[in-house]
């Protein structure tokens, strides 16, 4: 497994490089954002470990640039800033997971394994799951809400809904599990690939983003809160 570490603190670079090399990974290092972006663009990596605070081009900008190029390489962000707002900013830029410094070796390795387990082809391989009788090949449909798995686009009543990458993954997961209560931890595990402790407020923030786009005025609410349990996607009775 080839990993790219983009980090400017020599002590952190030494620690991560030594530990991951001992764990059997092939680790390349870039000490600034621009060099990291160039390496990620010119070479193939299975995962990128990206610090937020970098000289010149910060990690958020690097992540956005890679996603703009349609680079789907899993990205694990590192930062000393652990507030909900900072976590959301990192995930919203296109990162797949977020690890706050200082962290333990075992947690870093667990998050890397979690991200590497995620197969980007899974969505394609399961695209023909029937959601209801109105399902069309590669299109998920719940009530009047449609999600095209080929074009990665959503619409309701024929009107396009603009989604970020994270909002798209969240909506796809909910549409594959209609009329079922989804807990916050279940959503974290399946949308963010996190199967251990992480601030579940991130889920609330993104469900709220998605609700504002899907539950439009004068239209029946589809994304519903089940108090004390989680969220559900279903037609309003």
Image (spheres, rainbow, N blue to C red):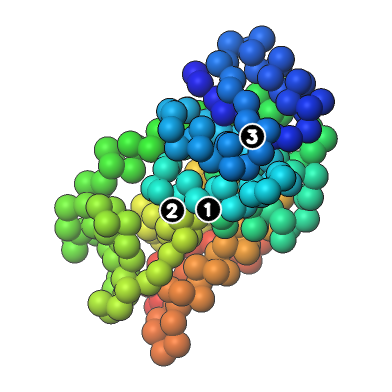
The residue that appears at 32% across and 56% down in the rendered structure is: 152
- Per the model, the C-alpha gap separating discs 3 and 2 is 18 Å
Residue matched to label 3: 6
Residue at 77% from the left image edge and 21% from the top image edge: 15
Is 78 positioned to the left or the right of 80 in the image?
left
Proximity of marks 1 and 2: CB atoms separated by less than 8 Å? yes
Q: Is residue 182 above or below residue 146?
A: above
Q: Secondary structure at mark 2?
A: helix
Placement of 163 over or under 129, stated as above or below: below
Position of residue 51 relative to residue 65, above or below, is above
Q: Residue 48's image quarter? A: top right
- Indicate the position of residue 38 as horizontal and vertical percent values: 51, 37
Between 101 and 115, the one lying in front of the other is 101
User: Which SS class for mark 3?
Assistant: strand
Query: What label sits on residue 68 in the rendered view?
Result: 2
Nearest the camera: 232 or 93? Answer: 93
Compute the Cα span from label 1 to label 3.
15 Å
Q: Nearer the viewer, residue 130 or 77?
A: 77
* Image position of 148 (left or right of 113): left
Q: Position of residue 107 (x, y in %)?
A: 71, 28
Disc 1 crowd, CA 10 A, few/some/many (<14, 14-19, 20+): some
Q: Circle 3: is it few (<14), some (14-19), or many (20+) Cα within 10 Å?
A: many
């Amino acid at each position: 497994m080839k990993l790219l570490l983009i980090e400017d603190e020599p002590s952190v670079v030494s620690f991560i490089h030594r530990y991951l090399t001992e764990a059997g990974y092939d680790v390349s290092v870039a000490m600034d954002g621009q060099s990291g972006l160039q390496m990620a663009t010119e070479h193939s990596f299975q995962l990128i470990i990206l610090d937020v605070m970098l000289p010149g081009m910060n990690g958020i900008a690097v992540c956005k640039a890679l996603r703009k190029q349609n680079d789907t390489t899993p990205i694990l962000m590192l930062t000393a800033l652990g507030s909900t707002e900072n976590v959301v900013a990192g995930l919203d830029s296109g990162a797949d997971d977020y690890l706050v410094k200082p962290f333990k070796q075992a947690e870093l390795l667990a998050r890397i394994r979690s991200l590497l387990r995620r197969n980007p082809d899974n969505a394609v391989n399961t695209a023909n799951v029937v959601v209801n009788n109105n399902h069309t090949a590669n299109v998920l449909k719940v009530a009047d809400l449609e999600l095209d798995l080929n074009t990665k686009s959503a619409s309701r009543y024929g009107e396009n809904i603009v989604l970020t990458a994270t909002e798209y993954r969240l909506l796809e997961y909910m549409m594959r599990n209609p009329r079922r209560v989804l807990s916050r931890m279940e959503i974290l595990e399946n949308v963010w690939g996190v199967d251990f402790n992480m601030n579940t407020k991130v889920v609330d923030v993104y469900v709220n983003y998605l609700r504002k786009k899907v539950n439009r005025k004068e239209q029946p609410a589809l994304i519903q809160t089940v108090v004390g349990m989680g969220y559900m996607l279903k037609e309003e009775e």
